[in-house]
Amino acid sequence: QVQLVESGGGLVQAGGSLRLSCEASGRTFTNYSMGWFRQAPGKEREFVAAISWRGGSTYYGDSVKGRFTVSRDNTKNTVYLQMNNLKPEDTAVYYCAAKAWNAQGLSGADFGSWGQGTQVTVSS
């Protein structure tokens, strides 16, 4: 399995921005499509965004469309999540995940490798 380590979380005021990073190691990065998920206390895990192995295709959850942007740098084995116009309801632990480049689906069950998560807190 690929190992994933997220960074970049923190505390930000509503309307602010953060950029999360997820560095992969242990396997060939371009063998994987990458995703971001989040989970708030007492809520189910939610799909946030995903990007194909080459970066040519991106997907977003409805709640973040137009505010978040997923990207990847295959030379650095890193995927990013740029989060703009943050809202208090974006507060959650954000997880990076990986799945085989040709695997279908965008649910959590479709991703086989997960990072430890990074906390994002948005104050009102």
Image (cartoon, rainbow, N blue to C red):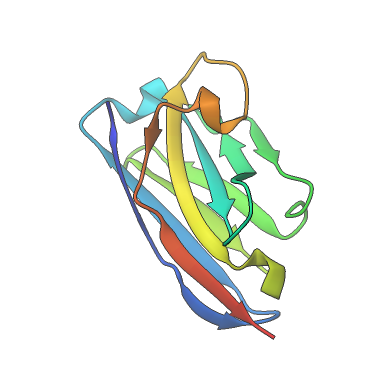
The answer, for residue 86, to whether it is visible in the render is: no
Residue 98 figure quarter: top left
Find residue 108 and report its horizontal and vertical position in percent.
55, 33
Q: Nearer the viewer, residue 24 or 105?
A: 105
Find residue 123 and report its horizontal and vertical position in percent.
63, 84
Q: Quadrant of the C terminus?
A: bottom right
Residue at (56, 52) in percent of width and height: 38
State whether residue 124 is above or below residue 67.
Answer: below
Q: Nearer the viewer, residue 43 or 39?
A: 43
Find residue 116 and report its horizontal and vertical position in percent.
34, 51
State whether residue 98 is above or below residue 64.
Answer: above
Judge from the rendering whether residue 77 lies leftward or rightward of residue 58; answer left or right. Answer: left
Q: How many marks?
A: 0
Q: Nearer the viewer, residue 104 or 89?
A: 89
State whether residue 90 is above or below residue 55.
Answer: below
Judge from the rendering whether residue 80 lies leftward or rightward of residue 122; answer left or right. Answer: left
Residue at (48, 28) in percent of width and height: 111
Judge from the rendering whether residue 65 lies leftward or rightward of residue 76; answer left or right. Answer: right
Find residue 35 and report its horizontal and vertical position in percent.
52, 38
Residue at (70, 79) in percent of width and height: 15
